[in-house]
Amino acid sequence: MRITDLLKACSVELNGTPQTKEETIKQMVALMEKGGNVTDVEKYKAGVFAREEEGTTGIGEGIAIPHAKTDAVNAPGLAAMVIPAGVDYDALDGQPVDLVFLIAAPNTEDNVHLEVLSRLSMLLMDESFKQNLLKAKTVEEFLAVVDRAENAKNEAEEEKAVNVPDSGYRVLAVTACPTGIAHTYMAAESLENTAKELGYTIKVETNGSGGDKNVLTAEEIAACDGIIVAADKEVRMARFDGKPVIVTKVADGIHKPQELIEDIINGRAKVYHNDGKGEENAGIGDESLGRKLYKALMNGVSHMLPFVIGGGILIALSFICDGANAGTDVFGNGTALAKFFNTVGNTAFGMMFPILAGYIAMAIGERPALMPGIVGGLLAKAGTSIFLPEDQWVSSGFFGALIAGFVAGYLMVLIKKNFLMHWRGQNRFCCIRFWGS
């Protein structure tokens, strides 16, 4: 699959005139609708705006890549708009945006399209590619520019796969964002291009929606000068124990690649030490509280989504299989098959609050916090109260699960820092007394 397989001529606008970020997104969604990729326009549009609330997709250099992965999309697709006068898109660099690509990704297990979307994200890091798109006079010329650049990129990737340095890589990196569609790959491309310009060898692992790619090996980690972790979600950190590591935002991988690489090369990165209590770790302790809370929340949301999506699909199937009972009280449960889908779907749906709370807690307090987080989520879902009879319980829903996750996570941190350390000290004292007796 190629980029031009997803980008249809009817979804390209070369003379866009939106005046605001909101107008830009609405016009981009309308272009996507023309391509026939969206079944529920309002739901898809809401998904795009929800992604913007997590952080702007205006990545700087005049480029924005809004996107959403939702079951309102029936087939992967792209839409593109050139805005000659530019528009204030709340971009990371504060500059107007003049080139927008909108991504529509379906909630399916088939992630072939993600490789194509990641390739587009990487191409947009090339200034000459962007300028050629802005200069295109016709839609056909615009698509031809994309096609030529993709061919050149594919050839470069094949050459890179063959030319692995014998002495290993001086710099390693991991990039990841909550959706794993655009920023993950743009950061990877920016780091690779900058390292090449500076004359250093680099390998970048991407933790995207299609899974982990270009995974770093133990031998490469042992031989490198240091590792850059540019991520807005949890990554596996225990493997970097004893190596210099820089943990930063994925946006810094896009906009500050030279600074990050030179900090590794010049020995300015702190040595990371794993505490030995879990595989997942948010970083090396110098992140702000707000960023830690954000990453914990994203960890919960990313693990919750499969239950929401899968449950929703199964419930929808229950209605499809029960068309004969449409309009009746038993619609969705009128046949054995429909009832099965509806029951399993609602069960999966009911798991989203415990999973959200559990993985928020795990991101904060590691594996020991998973159980209390899940239990807290179940209590929030049920509306459990010791002051009211069961028939008066009212579910606290999403916000209750959110609070339960953070409380469970930080409670486990408190226990580990105080009671566990005290127990270890007492245990060590008892051992000394035993051997000394």
Image (cartoon, rainbow, N blue to C red):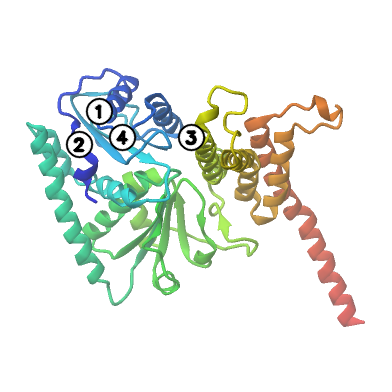
Q: Are marks 3 and 4 in contact (CB under 8 Å)?
A: no
Number of the front mark, 3 or 4: 3
Across and down, in percent, residue 168 comes to 33, 73
Residue linked to disc 3: 320
| Mark 3 or 1, closer to the camera | 3
Q: How far apart are the alpha carbons under marks 4 and 2?
A: 10 Å
| Residue furthest out toward the top | 19
Q: Looking at numbered disc 3 in the image, what kind of residue is underneath it?
A: Ile
Count of picture labels = 4
| Secondary structure category for the residue under label 3 | helix
Instruction: Give the amino acid at mark 1.
Output: Lys
Crowdedness of circle 1 by 10 Å Cα count: few (<14), some, many (20+)?
some
Q: Nearer the N terminus, badge 1 or badge 2?
A: 2
Task: Please determine whether, in this image, residue 237 is positioned above or below residue 350.
Answer: below
* CA distance for labels 3 and 4: 21 Å
- The residue type indicated by label 4 comes to Asn
Q: Nearer the viewer, residue 12 or 400?
A: 12
Say which element carries label 1: helix
The reply to whether residue 258 is visible in this rendering is no
Q: Position of residue 302 (x, y in %)?
A: 51, 44
- Work out whether 186 lies above or below 168: above
Which residue is identified by label 2? 8
Q: Cα distance, mark 1 to mark 2?
A: 9 Å
